[in-house]
Image (cartoon, rainbow, N blue to C red):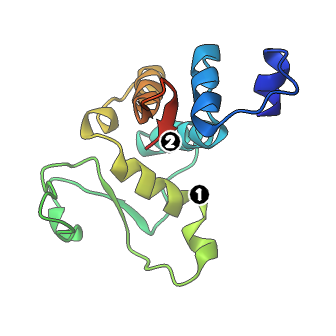
Amino acid sequence: LKMVKWILNETYMHYSNSEYLNKLSKLKLMPIDMKFKLNDLVLFHKIYYGTSKTNLPHYIHKQTDNNPTVFQRQTRSYNIQDIHKVKCTINPKINAFKRSYFYRCHELWNEIPQDLRTIQANEAFKIQLSSYLWSTLEPNRNGGMVLV
């Protein structure tokens, strides 16, 4: 928030959440939580497609054509043909594990649309993901933006 005020030379202004998001959008700056998601998912994408020196840990599995039974039906709309989903075989019992990078990112990865998960080129993925994340901000009645 202080950064936006400094850039716009509005040090003593007070913004509502929607005003703040609207100003970020005009400056083409992502909200910090969105930027963290973007960076996490870009790195996870590189790991998933093998362009990083890091590998997926033993408890994170890709769904494959050969082994679709690893993935239990989670909802009525679950798509067994979506081979780009990942599954964690560990049921976390403590919040520290739920906040760990791979557990957190496997959930984020499965939440983004399938067409994004199928993009193999790193830069194309980053551009499309950024557009998708911006689209998750909805305009409100006053012309501002709100996180959905």
**Which residue lies most toward the front here?**
142
Q: Name the image quarter holding residue 62.
A: bottom left
Residue 60, above or below 146 = below
Q: Residue at x 26, y 40 (%)?
A: 114
Vertical arrangement, residue 2 with respect to residue 99, above or below = above
Residue 1 is left or right of residue 124, and the answer is right
How far across and down, in percent of the image, does residue 78 sit?
Answer: 16, 58
| Residue in the picture at 57% in, 34% down | 18
Mark 1 burial class by Cα count in 10 Å: few <14, some 14-19, many 20+: few
With 82 as the anchor, is 91 left or right in this view? right
State the mark number for residue 41: 2
Tell me whether the residue at label 1 lies in contact with that at label 2, contact meaning CB atoms closer than 8 angstroms: no
Work out whether residue 19 or residue 99 is closer to the camera in this orientation and state it. 19
Q: Can you give x and y, in whole percent of width and height, for residue 103 in the image?
A: 50, 63
In the image, taking residue 36 as reference, residue 130 lies left or right, namely left
Residue 1 horizontal/vertical position (percent): 76, 34
| Crowd rating for badge 2 (residues with CA inside 10 Å; few <14, some 14–19, many 20+) | many
| Residue 123 horizontal side relative to residue 72, left or right | right
Residue 52 appears in the rendering? no
Which residue is farthest bottom? 93
User: Residue at the location (55% across, 40% down)?
Assistant: 43
Q: Could you say whether the residue bearing mark 2 is in a helix, strand or loop?
A: helix
Disc 1 designates what residue? Answer: 101
Q: Amino acid at mark 2?
A: Leu
Residue 19 quadrant = top right
Please tell me whether residue 82 is drawn above or below residue 119 in the rendered image.
Answer: below
Q: CA distance from mark 1 to mark 2?
A: 10 Å
